[in-house]
Amino acid sequence: MKYRVIFVTVALFLAIGLVLPGCASGEPSPTEAVSCLDTSVCPELDWVLATTEPSHDGWHVSAFDRAAERIALYTDGKFNITVKLQQELGIERDEFSQALGEGSIEIAFMQSAPLEAQIPSEGVFSLPFFTRTLEDCHKGVEATAYIREPRMKELGYTPAPGAYFVWMPQDLIFVEEVKDMIDLSGLRIRVWRTGDAKLLAELGAEPIYMSYSEVYMALQRGVIDGLNTSCDSMSKTSMWEVGNYFYRVDLAPSTCYVSYNTELFNGLPDKYKMLLNSELEAASQEVNRERAGEYQVGFQIMESNGVVMNMLNPEEIKVWQEKARPIWEEWADEDATNREAYDVVKKILNL
């Protein structure tokens, strides 16, 4: 994967040198490539990259901040991309598909879970205990591209080549200690994915769908008892101030496809297209490389702020997995394309 990024970057610089007069022959350095770009013939553009995140501090946002800075540098400030947080957009993540297809935003983080409304087969990445690791998700993304990508193009947008990353596993934090993680009866837990909601309900909990921006106050006021999200998100939003007991349950990480409006992308000069694709892929690969370390950072932040850190014991894991498997089959039977994606991924994961 590392060599692919180097190859793409070198190819980009070589292409710029070949198509523009006055460029040095051979393989230019990044500085030479910038000086070779004849910005006088390039349009001035201001695009938005919509993220699903609440902060620029997250490693998956900062990587794209840096990509946007490089794009502006390489184009002499003519192609500017503003990376926006979800609360700056005025729309929720489940509205990204329509906004991106219509072109009201140019680029967006398209997470597999919200995409289920338009592409139900993307739910394969939200099935609890199904795709559990980064490698599982890589295999699944590649194996199901033939289902996902044509549908995305019908909706008006295209995933940038190689520009996808894998989110963190989903865990739990509660205000009060949970005495029995096999029996969650009476506990109101904020969820955002259907598969997790069904599993928690099987364990006796009451799943409550809620925007992440409302969660802090809801925990503080006792509207909910717990939160289902990644440890990284918890640490970035100071959830240790309202939650005291963390439980690592390792529910499936979601995938995220960095996608752009197809018509707007097709209207870009070729130099901009190459640059955009190269930078989005490089940023996505950076996110995937840093993922494991960032999980540990989030874990340490929570622990250092007094949160009691817990893990499921083997018996609890066994019960959770047993309750998850019928949810897999139920989901697969809802739609023929679901079944197709499920069978393909199940086979390559040897489940």
Image: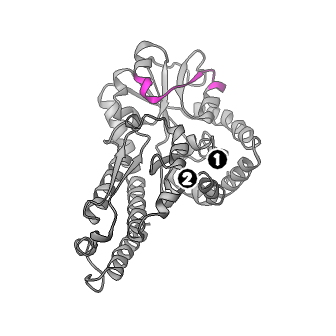
| SS at mark 1 in the image | loop
Where in the figure is residue 270, as x and y percent of width and height? Answer: 42, 70
Residue found 58% across the figure and 15% down from its top: 186
In the visual, does 249 lie left or right of 240?
right
Q: Looking at the image, is 142 positioned above or below residue 48?
A: below
Q: Which of the numbered marks, if any, corresponds to residue 137?
A: 2
Q: Is residue 298 magenta?
A: no
How crowded pointer 2 is (Cα within 10 Å; few <14, some 14-19, many 20+) is rated as: many
Where in the figure is residue 84, as x and y percent of width and height? Answer: 36, 43
Which color scheme did the rendering employ for the protein? Answer: one colour
The disc labelled 2 sits on which kind of residue? Answer: Cys
How crowded pointer 1 is (Cα within 10 Å; few <14, some 14-19, many 20+) is rated as: some
- Between 337 and 41, the residue placed more toward the observer is 41
The disc labelled 1 sits on which kind of residue? Answer: Ile
Q: Looking at the image, is 130 positioned above or below residue 33?
A: above
Q: How many marks?
A: 2
Q: Which residues are magenta?
A: 201-216
Q: Is residue 213 magenta?
A: yes
Residue found 25% across the figure and 64% down from its top: 76
- Between 203 and 21, the residue placed more toward the observer is 21
Q: Which residue is mark 1?
A: 119
Where in the figure is residue 240, as x and y percent of width and height? Answer: 35, 25
Distance CA(mark 2)–CA(mark 1): 17 Å
Q: Is residue 253 visible?
A: no
Q: Looking at the image, is 77 positioned above or below residue 24?
A: above
